[in-house]
Image (cartoon, rainbow, N blue to C red):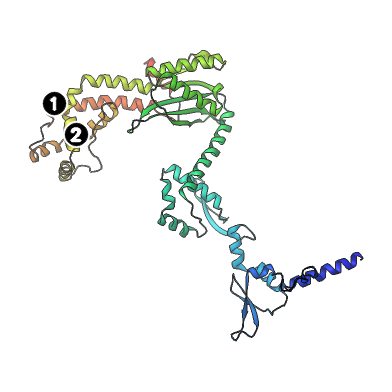
């Protein structure tokens, strides 16, 4: 058989296939006709008396096209290529031609409005959803709430609901991606300074946070949290040093640490000695270790003020007990607020009870109490059980203490800055 005859036979087979009849290779099997793919998206319509086929109905646009049983289906295929509802549906699934939508974006400080095309991206939506739950600390189960799903589907009908376990996996995946990005940035940095702190939660669990500070290529001060982990007791120097070294090894920045800032706890002094020996052994101790350990100046100030307040605690005792008496009962606090309204004082302020270990809370308590100085005598007239009314001398001393603490508050806020260098401020204080 010649090549021309073979081509002719192939054409005949295609033509038979187009009208719904199988080729000779399959016709030997009776009642086994191949169903054209086009019928997956068309329905055969018969007459009312079921006498015969009168057309084919598109399942997307519901339009009726001419068709007779055993007839050709090429015109049905051509219709599917231009069927608008079908193209829109394929656009959402990214399987075919996509219909461009328009969106308005406000960019830059000039707040210019730009017109651009919009294309729904379910992967991008999943990523933004994970970021939203991370930043705002929403519970994972919220993603399954009925009204939340309804809200998202009203914003875009193409939104596909996910389960909380899927969202959790997305958050972990996003963390891994961002961690690799930060690793790439830190790889190009020559020197890194660390700060770390420990505290105990209300569940009596110990936590440690490790933060790195560095200058980027444009000489802008940057900071990033490297680790926030649970640190089981006891919080010895060895445990702290091991946790820090494990984190540095994970980020591959052991040879880049120039300084580390910690508070004045004895366990931190022990941890610093271990870290210094470790870096010296590997030849990664910079500046001859002269400034490796930087003591937290804000913590030093805190110890100084706490020591001073312990000497004058009796001076403000009546004010502290007065505030505690008001805060312990909602009915007393309501009565106190009623007097505040009668005197037309600011209702945006409220009483603050200090925490013994936080001197700045003592300053906040005195400031708030001084603003409501005129309220306490009137409350005494309405409550015979109130026995801690401050005298005029108490108020005078409280004002002096508050003014004194204001200086330390400003210094602490200056030392606690994270977007500008603070070591020069500490040196300035030492010189003065």
User: Is 153 placed above or below 301 here?
Assistant: below
Quadrant of the image containing the C terminus:
top left
Front-most of residues 380 and 204: 204
Question: What residue is drawn where x is 43% and y is 24%?
Answer: 422
Quarter of the figure with residue 208: top left
Q: Regarding mark 1 in the picture, which secondary structure is present there?
A: helix
Q: Position of residue 218 (x, y in %)?
A: 55, 31
Residue for badge 1: 393
User: Is 53 placed above or below 428 here?
Assistant: below
**Crowd tier of the residue under label 2, counting other residues whose Cα lies within 10 Å: few below 14, some 14–19, many 20 or above:** some
Q: Position of residue 123 (x, y in %)?
A: 55, 50
Question: What residue is drawn where x is 68% and y is 72%?
Answer: 76
**Crowd tier of the residue under label 1, counting other residues whose Cα lies within 10 Å: few below 14, some 14–19, many 20 or above:** few
Q: Is residue 396 left or right of residue 221?
A: left
Quarter of the figure with residue 340: top left
Residue for badge 2: 324
Quarter of the figure with residue 16: bottom right
Front-most of residues 368 and 14: 14
Q: Regarding mark 2 in the picture, which secondary structure is present there?
A: helix
* Nearer-N-terminus badge (2/1): 2
Q: Position of residue 88 (x, y in %)?
A: 59, 63
Quadrant of the image containing the N terminus:
bottom right
């Amino acid at each position: 058989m010649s090549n021309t005859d073979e081509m002719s036979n192939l054409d005949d087979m295609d033509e038979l296939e187009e009208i719904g009849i199988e080729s000779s290779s399959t016709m030997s099997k009776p009642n086994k006709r191949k169903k054209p793919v086009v019928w997956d998206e068309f329905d055969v319509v018969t007459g009312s008396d079921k006498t015969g086929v009168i057309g084919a109905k598109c399942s997307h646009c519901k339009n009726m096209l001419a068709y007779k049983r055993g007839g050709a289906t090429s015109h049905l295929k051509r219709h599917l290529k231009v069927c608008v509802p079908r193209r829109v549906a394929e656009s959402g699934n990214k399987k075919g031609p996509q219909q461009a939508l328009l969106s308005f974006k406000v960019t830059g400080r000039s707040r210019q409005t730009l017109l651009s095309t919009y294309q729904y991206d379910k992967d991008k939506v999943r990523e933004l959803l994970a970021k939203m739950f991370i930043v705002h600390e929403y519970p994972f189960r919220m993603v399954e709430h009925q009204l939340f799903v309804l809200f998202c589907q009203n914003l875009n009908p193409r939104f596909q609901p996910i389960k909380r376990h899927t969202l959790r996996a997305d958050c972990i995946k996003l963390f891994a991606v961002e961690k690799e990005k930060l690793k790439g940035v830190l790889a190009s940095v020559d020197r890194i300074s660390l700060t770390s702190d420990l505290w105990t939660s209300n569940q009596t669990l110990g936590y440690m946070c490790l933060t790195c500070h560095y200058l980027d290529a444009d000489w802008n001060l940057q900071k990033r949290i490297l680790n926030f982990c649970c640190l089981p007791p006891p919080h010895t120097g060895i445990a702290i040093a091991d946790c820090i070294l494990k984190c540095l090894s994970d980020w591959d920045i052991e040879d880049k640490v120039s300084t580390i800032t910690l508070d004045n706890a004895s366990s931190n002094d022990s941890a610093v000695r271990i870290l210094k020996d470790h870096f010296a052994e590997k030849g990664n101790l910079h500046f001859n270790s002269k400034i490796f350990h930087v003591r937290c100046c804000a913590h030093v100030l805190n110890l100084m003020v706490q020591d001073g307040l312990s000497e004058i605690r009796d001076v403000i005792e009546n004010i502290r007990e007065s505030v505690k008496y008001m805060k312990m009962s909602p009915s007393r606090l309501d009565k106190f607020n009623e007097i505040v309204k009668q005197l037309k004082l600011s209702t945006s302020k409220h009483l603050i009870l200090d925490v013994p270990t936080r001197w700045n809370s003592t300053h906040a308590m005195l400031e708030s109490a001084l603003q409501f100085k005129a309220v306490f005598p009137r409350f005494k007239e309405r409550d015979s059980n109130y026995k801690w009314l401050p005298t005029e001398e108490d108020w005078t001393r409280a004002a002096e203490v508050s003014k004194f603490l204001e200086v330390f508050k400003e210094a602490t806020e200056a030392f606690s800055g994270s977007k500008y260098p603070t070591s020069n401020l500490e040196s300035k204080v030492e010189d003065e």
